[in-house]
Structures are given as structure tokens and as C-alpha cells.
Image (cartoon, grey):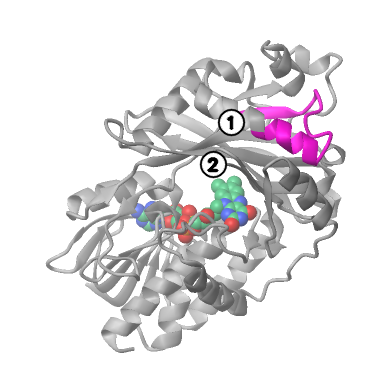
């Protein structure tokens, strides 16, 4: 049987962060990276804008500022990003603070989806050069904790230390994994919102600040801004009842040749549940299924002009006076978001959008499109045994799926932190 000092499940940034750190600590370690997709490095494939300032991407319950800053320095040293310049920030800050909104200053880099693929290629070839085994199209099915073995879609192997980093798409897998291995967890929070798409000239702040992070009252924020060659996309999820649902997202290419003059960004509101509803995933699946019902199996899109008038957007309406640009995700159903989004989210998000329009006038142009739903499930909260995300003897759960990160840099830092824990325990 194959045998490894450290097996890592998932080739996203959390898995890679762990792999590089383990090999830096102990170059002769037998390291396996298991990836269920044909080609991957998880979320590095999407847009690849990286944030190097706390708290962006760092769930603060695990990451006090000093700890996150120390890891961010290490991530930055390793990845050597080119930090984007920012301009006129004090003007936007002043406008925001007058109406109770905060603009966070964040050190950012942006590779674009194409640039991300180049980064992935170079990281994977470096890892292979360091002796790691990368097994694509091999999915972890289950483990035997006593025997320290794992069963996969291709066979079995032995592990001494196991890092499980399956990302947001592995959210459900991880819940099953935790149940089977008697790892306690809670999942009581959720982010729900819309993705806004408009012409770059209606959101000109992106020329000064690539991914501006505004914090509005009521736990509402802007998130994941893409511009230049920007596209709204849909991610497919399988609910536990077997139904498919979609959540929208966004990304951009780096190449100016593909420029489409559009911008997209999310406005999300976070909610934490108390008894009797304790599962963010159950709630997310319910909301998504309502959205799919109203959208005929697709996400919904609505022009701001129609939203203001309280009427649905129609396919024909997309071509009338309000017509200004073609939606980049044309497969969505023109409709009425307020039929599908609970008032608590809708009110806060609409309030935030009006505030944003005061700070960056023009964003609420009648042609601006709201896409729904954008749902973020990264709220699995395993009960960890230590600060290095060890959830059971020799088993570490990290990254977005395990709720230790909400973005690339924090996911990488999470993997590194697990590797630090392994190295400390093993004396590497
Ligand atoms: C469209 C889009 C755009 C985004 N843009 C940005 C951005 O610009 N900046 C940013 O910071 N974040 C962005 N994100 C979020 C970012 O991708 C994640 O925060 C990050 O990738 C999380 O890293 P991770 O390693 O935890 O998980 P992932 O990157 O999701 O990697 C997990 C990997 O594990 C594999 N896997 C899952 N289950 C198994 C299993 N059972 N066996 C084997 N392999 C398995 C998956 O196939 C996947 O490759 C974006 C996400 C999306 C979807």
C-alpha cells in the first residue's frame, strides 16, 4: 500500500500552503496531494486577486491581527505578488465615513483567471520538483482513523498526518467526514447577497482601487470586485436532497484584449442563526431552491430600474430603453429578486447599495443588474483541539470548507498554520 508522512486532500491554496511548508520543514517527507478534479489548484483558478491585509479573508475568531499579520508576511514572501497601486482613497473614505460606512484599505494583487493558471502551473511544477506526489482525479472517500488508512476513488493509502482542505465545494463532503469521524462541528452562519454588474464608468472607483472593501451597517459588505475583462459566472452545487442549485460569482481576465468594460462585485449580508435553526447549509439550500423555483432552474437577474419600480425584469425589457449592456451571464432568468430573497437580506443590501451610490455616484444606474443568489457557505466550524486546526489526532481541517478562511491568502495561511502544527508535533 502507498504510504505517506503527510497526505493532503485538495490542491487549493490551503492544500498548497500546507504542502510547501511541510516540504520546507522536512524535505524528505513523503507528501501526497490528492485532488478529485482533472486539473486543479482549487480557487487559484478563479480571478486570483489576493488580499494581504487583515481581516480580509480571515475569520477573526481564529485569526487575531498579530497572528494573521505574521502569516500574511510569510504568504507574501512565498508568493511574491505585485501589489497594485491605489489612488484617491481619502476622498472615498471621507464620503463613506460621513454616512457611517467604512472603507478598508487593503494591499491587493490581481493575476486574473489566466494569470492564476500560470501561477498554478509553476506552483505544481515546483511541488513535483520538491518530490511531492500529486494525484489528480483521485477523490478521498473515507478514512480509518485507527489504522490510519484512507480509501479513495482509486484505492487505499496509509497516512501519518492528514490535512483535509476540500474548499467550499467540499463543504458537504467535510460535514460527512466530520460525522463519520466523530469530530464535533457547528454551522450556524451564512452570507447571502447579490452580485452587481454595471459598466465600469458607473463604478469608476475600480480605476483607483481594484477591489474596494466597504463595510456597511448591519453586517453588510462589498466583496470580490472584478473589472476590466469581468464576467459573472454561476457555480453549480448539489443539495443534499439531490437537487442542483446555482450560486453566482464573478471573475476577470487580466488581458486587456478581452476587456468588456464591465465591473461586477458582490454585496453580502452575514447572519448567524440561533436555536432552533442551527444549520447554515440547510438554510442556504432552502433559499437556493426558492431562487431556482422563481428562476426556472437558473439564477435571477433584475435591472435596478425595474427593481426600483417594483416590477420584474423581462427578457424583452432587457432590450428596451433601459438596455445599456448585455448581461455577462445571459443564461440567468430575468425576474424579480424580491420574490426570492428574504426581507432581512434585501433591506440591508438595498440600504447598502443606496449608500454606495452616495459614495460612488452612478452605481445605481437603471441599467445596473442585480444577480441572485450569491451564497457563501464557509461556516463549518469544527471543534479544534489546538490553534493549528487539528480536529482529531493527526487530522487537520483547513481552508474555506473548514471555515478557517474566506479567500486565497487566508486559505494559504491556514495550510501553513496546520503544517506548523504538524512540524511542531513531529519535531521536523
Ligand atoms: C468564481 C470565484 C472567484 C473567486 N475569486 C477569488 C479572488 O479573486 N480572491 C480570493 O481571495 N478568493 C476568491 N475566491 C475564493 C477562493 O477561491 C477560495 O477562498 C479559496 O480557493 C479557498 O481555498 P481552499 O484551498 O480552502 O479550497 P479550494 O481552493 O476550493 O480547493 C479545494 C480543492 O479540494 C478538492 N476536493 C474537494 N473535495 C475533495 C475530495 N473529497 N477529494 C479530493 N479532492 C477534493 C476540490 O476539487 C478543490 O480543488 C473565488 C471563488 C470563486 C468560486
Residue 15 found in image quarter: bottom left
Where residue 206 appears, as percent x and y from the top left, is 80, 49
Sequence-wise, which precedes: disc 2 or disc 1? 2
Near-viewer residue (317 or 351): 351
Give the percent coordinates (x, y) of residue 295.
Answer: 56, 19
- Relative image position of residue 259 (x, y in whole percent): 83, 46
Q: Is residue 219 left or right of residue 266?
A: left
Is residue 363 highlighted in magenta?
Answer: yes
Q: Examine the image and state in which quarter residue 43 appears.
A: bottom right
**Secondary structure under badge 2?**
loop
- Which stretch is magenta? 352-372
Q: Which residue shows up at 30% across the image and 36% down it?
A: 278
Residue 39 in view of the camera:
no
Question: Mark 2 highlights which residue?
Answer: 219
Q: Residue at x 83, y 52 (%)?
A: 91
Return the residue at label 1. Answer: 348
Q: Could you give the CA–CA distance between mark 2 and mark 1, rounded to whole angstroms?
A: 8 Å
State left or right for residue 121 relative to residue 171. right
Q: Quadrant of the N terminus?
A: bottom left
In front: 152, or 248? 248
Amino acid at each position: 500500500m502507498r504510504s505517506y508522512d503527510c497526505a493532503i486532500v485538495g490542491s487549493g491554496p490551503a492544500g498548497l500552503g500546507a504542502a510547501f511548508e511541510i516540504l520546507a520543514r522536512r524535505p524528505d517527507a513523503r507528501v501526497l496531494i490528492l485532488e478529485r478534479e482533472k486539473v486543479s489548484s482549487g480557487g487559484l483558478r478563479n480571478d486570483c486577486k489576493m488580499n494581504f491585509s487583515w481581516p480580509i479573508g480571515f475569520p477573526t475568531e481564529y485569526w487575531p491581527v498579530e497572528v494573521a499579520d505574521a502569516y500574511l508576511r510569510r504568504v507574501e514572501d512565498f508568493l511574491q505578488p505585485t501589489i497594485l497601486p491605489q489612488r484617491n482613497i481619502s476622498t472615498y473614505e471621507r464620503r463613506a465615513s460621513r454616512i457611517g460606512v467604512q472603507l478598508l484599505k487593503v494591499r491587493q494583487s490581481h493575476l486574473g483567471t489566466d494569470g492564476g493558471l500560470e501561477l498554478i502551473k509553476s506552483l505544481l511544477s515546483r511541488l513535483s520538483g520538491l518530490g511531492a506526489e500529486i494525484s489528480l482525479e483521485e477523490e478521498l472517500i473515507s478514512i480509518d482513523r485507527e489504522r490510519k488508512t484512507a480509501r479513495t476513488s482509486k484505492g487505499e493509502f496509509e497516512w501519518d498526518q492528514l490535512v483535509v482542505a476540500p474548499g467550499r465545494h467540499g463543504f458537504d463532503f467535510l460535514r460527512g467526514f466530520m460525522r463519520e469521524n466523530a469530530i464535533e462541528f457547528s454551522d450556524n452562519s451564512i452570507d447571502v447577497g447579490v452580485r452587481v454588474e454595471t459598466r465600469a464608468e458607473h463604478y469608476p472607483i475600480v480605476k483607483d482601487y481594484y477591489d474596494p472593501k466597504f463595510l456597511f451597517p448591519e453586517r453588510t459588505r462589498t466583496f470580490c470586485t472584478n473589472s476590466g475583462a469581468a464576467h459573472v459566472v454561476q457555480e453549480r452545487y448539489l443539495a443534499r436532497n439531490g437537487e442542483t442549485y446555482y450560486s453566482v460569482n464573478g471573475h476577470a481576465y487580466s488581458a486587456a484584449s478581452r476587456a468588456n468594460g464591465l465591473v461586477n462585485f458582490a454585496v453580502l449580508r452575514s447572519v448567524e442563526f440561533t436555536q432552533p435553526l442551527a444549520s447554515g447549509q440547510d438554510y442556504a439550500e432552502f433559499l437556493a431552491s426558492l431562487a431556482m423555483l422563481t428562476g426556472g432552474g437558473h439564477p435571477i437577474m433584475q435591472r435596478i430600474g425595474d427593481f426600483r419600480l417594483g416590477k420584474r425584469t423581462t427578457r424583452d425589457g432587457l432590450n428596451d430603453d433601459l438596455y445599456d449592456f448585455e448581461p455577462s451571464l445571459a443564461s440567468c432568468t430575468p425576474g424579480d429578486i424580491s420574490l426570492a430573497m428574504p426581507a432581512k437580506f434585501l433591506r440591508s443590501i438595498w440600504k447598502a447599495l443606496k449608500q454606495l451610490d452616495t459614495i460612488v455616484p452612478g452605481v445605481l444606474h437603471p441599467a445596473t443588474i442585480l444577480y441572485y443568489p450569491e451564497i457563501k457557505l464557509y461556516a463549518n466550524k469544527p471543534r479544534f483541539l489546538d490553534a493549528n486546526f487539528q480536529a482529531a489526532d493527526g487530522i487537520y481541517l483547513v481552508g474555506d470548507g473548514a471555515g478557517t478562511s474566506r479567500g486565497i491568502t487566508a486559505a494559504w495561511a491556514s495550510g501553513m498554520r496546520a503544517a506548523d502544527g504538524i512540524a511542531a508535533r513531529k519535531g521536523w
